[in-house]
Image: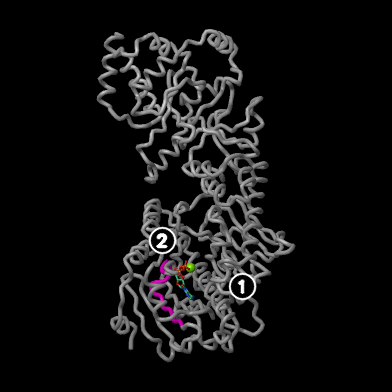
Amino acid sequence: MTQTQKKQDNLETFDTDVARLLDIVANALYTNRDVFLRELISNAADACDRLRYESLQDENLLGDHSDLNIRILKDTDARTVTIIDTGIGMSEDELRDNLGTIARSGTAKIMEAMKDQKESGDLNLIGQFGVGFYSSFMIADSVEVISRKAGEDKTWHWSSDGRTGFSLREADADERTLLLPAARGTRIILHVKNDASDYLLEDKLKQIILRYSDHIDIPVYVGDKTDDETPVNAASALWTRPKNDITEEQYLEFYGHIGHVFDQPLKTIHWRAEGKIEYTGLLFIPALRPWDLYDPERKHGVRLYVKRIFITDSLDGLIYPWMRFLKGVIDSEDLPLNISREMLQHNPVVDKIRRGVTKKVLSELHTLSQKDEIAFDSFWHQFGMVIKEGLYDAAEHREEIFKICRFFSTHEENKLTSLENYISRMKDGQEEIYYMSGENLQSMQSSPQLEGFKARGIEVLFMTDTVDSFWLQNVMDYQGKKFTSVTKGAVDLDKFESTQKEDKEESEDTQKQKPDLENLLGAMQDILKDEVKTVRISSRLTDSPVCLVADDGAVDMQMERVLKIHQKYDPTEKTKVLEINPDHALIQKLNTLKADDPALTDAAWLLYDQALIIQGEPISDSSGFARRMAKFMESGL
Ligand code: ADP
Ligand code: MG
C-alpha cells in the first residue's frame, strides 16, 4: 500500500480551530523555527513523566524496559528528523483527540491573539498556549506519528500533511518494530521541508537541545545508540541543582517550559524549606498578567513533584487561588509516592506546604517592595487585585498581605502608598484609616466628601478595585485602626484642626454664631422624603453646599453599586443621607426662605440632583431637573 492510498482510506478532517492554527503555522516563515524541537521534546518528557507516575500504581506498565529516555535521529537521505520517546504513548482515541483538536477552553481567544500577531509579523505565540505539537509543521511538510500506549497491545499510525486533515490506522508490522525494544511510547517522524535542511545536521539539533531543553530531567540522546553514550542535556531536574550552578538563561528556559510563556519573569524564587516538612520550591512571578487571570476557572501554574517524580499540575490545595499567577515547581520529600491525586486534595502535608509557600512568596514580595519600588509597583499593578482576594480568603496571612498592599491616596497624586506610611502620617487623635471607594480615581479625587478631610490634612485612601468592596466588608481594621468610609455614616471632623490658618479663625467665628438650621433641615427632609433617609449638617464639606453619604448601618455607596450589579440589593430601602454645608452662602440663603416657598422646593431638588450627578449616579427625574435649572438661570440672569 502506498502512502496516498492509506490516506484516502481513512482521512479525517481537523477540528476547525486546528485548521486555522495550521494555516498560521504554515505561514510562520520568519519565526524562530528552532522551537519545534523544544515543543516535541517537552511533550516527550511529559509522556515519560506520566508513565513514571502511572507505574507507581502499576509496575507492569514499564515491562522489561524501565528506561525512560528521548532519542533524536536524523536521516539525511530520507530527509527525516525523528523524535522517539519511551513514555506513556497514545491510544487510538488519544491520537485523534490530542492531535486532531485543541481541547482547551479559550481557544477562540488564543486564535485572536495569534491572528493579531500574524498581522504584526511576530509569531512568538506559537507554543505558548499548548499548540506545541503543531509547530512541527513549521519545518515539516508531513508528519507521521507511531504510538503505542503502555499496557496496551495495539500500535497506531497517525499521519498528516498539516493541511486538511489526518489519517489514523493500525500500524503495520514494519512500523510496529520501530518502537522496539521498549514496545511502547511514541515515534514522531518529520519529513523535512526543502527550506529547512539545516535541521538535518546533528550539531544543529544538539545546539537547540542545549539551548532549550537542558533542564529536562529525562536524558535526551542524539544519534544512534552506543553503549557509553552520554545525553546531550544535563538531564537532572533544574530545581535540585545548587542555585550558584544555574544561569539566568537556564532559569528563563525553565520558566518558558513550565509556564508556556516567553517573557521574562518579574521574580524568580528558588529555595529549600527545611525542618518538619521538607520541600524545594522554584517559583516564578510573571511580569505580566495572563489574559485569563480573572477567569474564575483559571488554575495556578505550579506543578507538584514528589522526590523528583511529577505528580500533578492541578492540585488546588497547593496554591491559594489568590496566588494563581504563580508558575513553577514544588518538589516534596514528605509526601508518599503512591498517593492518589484525589487523596492529595485534603492532605495535611499539602496544607503545610501551601502555608510555607505563601509565607515565602509574601516575604519575598515584601523585600522587593523595600528594595525596588519600581519593580514592586509594577507587580502591584499587574496582580494587586488578585492578591487582595487573600484579605478575605486567607485570614491567617492577612497581616503579611496588608504589608504589601498599596493604595492611591490624597497624600500624593497618582502615587501608591503602603498602610504603614499612611499610619505614619495620621493626625493626632486620628484613630481610623479613612478611605473612599469608587471606580474612577480622577472623579474621586475631586469629590465633595473629601473637602473637609483635605482642609484638615487628613489622608484618605482610594479604593478603586471591585475586590476592595468585598474585603472591606469582611476586614474591620489594620493594627487596631478601623477602616472607615468617608462616604458613609457621620464623621466628626471638627475634633481635628484645620491646617489652613484663616479657615481656622473663620470656623471659630462660625462656631460662635452657628446659624440655626433646624427648620431648613426639616423642610428639605420633607421635600426629599422619598429619596433620602435624612438631611443633616456636615463637617465634611468646605466648598460644596451638599453631598451624599450612606447611612451608618448601610453599605458604602460604591458597595451598593457593586451589589446592584450582582442583583443582591434591595432598591426600596432608603440609605442615602444628604449632608449640607452650614457655612455655605447658598445654604445660609436658603435658611431665610419660608418652608412653603416654592423656590426652596426647587433648590432642594436641584441640590440633591447635583449631588447625585457628582456621584456618577443617575437622577430619577431628568426633565424636572432641567425645568428647575432653567427657572433658576432665568431668574439669575
Ligand atoms: P500540550 O503539550 O500543551 O498539551 P501539544 O500540542 O504539545 O500541547 O500536545 C498535545 C497533546 O498531545 C499533549 O497534551 C499530549 O496529551 C499528547 N502528546 C503529544 N506528544 C506526545 C508524546 N510524545 N507522547 C504522548 N502524548 C503526546
Ligand atoms: Mg506540548
Is residue 140 inside the magenta stretch?
yes
Q: Which quarter of the image is occupied by the N terminus?
A: bottom left
Q: Which quarter of the image is occupied by the C terminus?
A: top left
Q: Which residue is drawn at 59% across and 58% down?
A: 252
Vertical order, 136 against 262 (above or below)? below
Q: Residue at x 63, y 47 (%)?
A: 365
Where does residue 630 sit, x and y in percent of width and height?
Answer: 26, 16
Left or right, 48 with reference to 368: left
Q: What distance separates the C-alpha of mark 1 from that of mark 2?
A: 38 Å
Where does residue 198 sit, x and y in percent of width and height?
Answer: 49, 69
Where does residue 272 sit, x and y in percent of width and height?
Answer: 70, 61
Chain part drawn in magenta = 137-147
Is residue 591 inside the magenta stretch?
no
Residue 279, picture quadrant: bottom right
Residue type (three-letter) at the residue carrying disc 1: Ile
Vertical order, 106 against 487 (above or below)? below
Where does residue 257 sit, x and y in percent of width and height?
Answer: 54, 63
Residue 579 appears in view: yes
Q: Which mark is residue 309?
A: 1
Q: Is mark 2 on a helix, strand or loop?
A: loop
Magenta stretch, main secondary structure, is: strand
Q: Is mark 1 on a helix, strand or loop?
A: strand
Point out the tag, 1 or 2, that comes first from the N-terminus.
2
Residue type (three-letter) at the residue carrying disc 2: Leu
Q: Name the residue under label 2.
A: 29
Question: Which of these two is toward me, 392 or 176?
Answer: 392
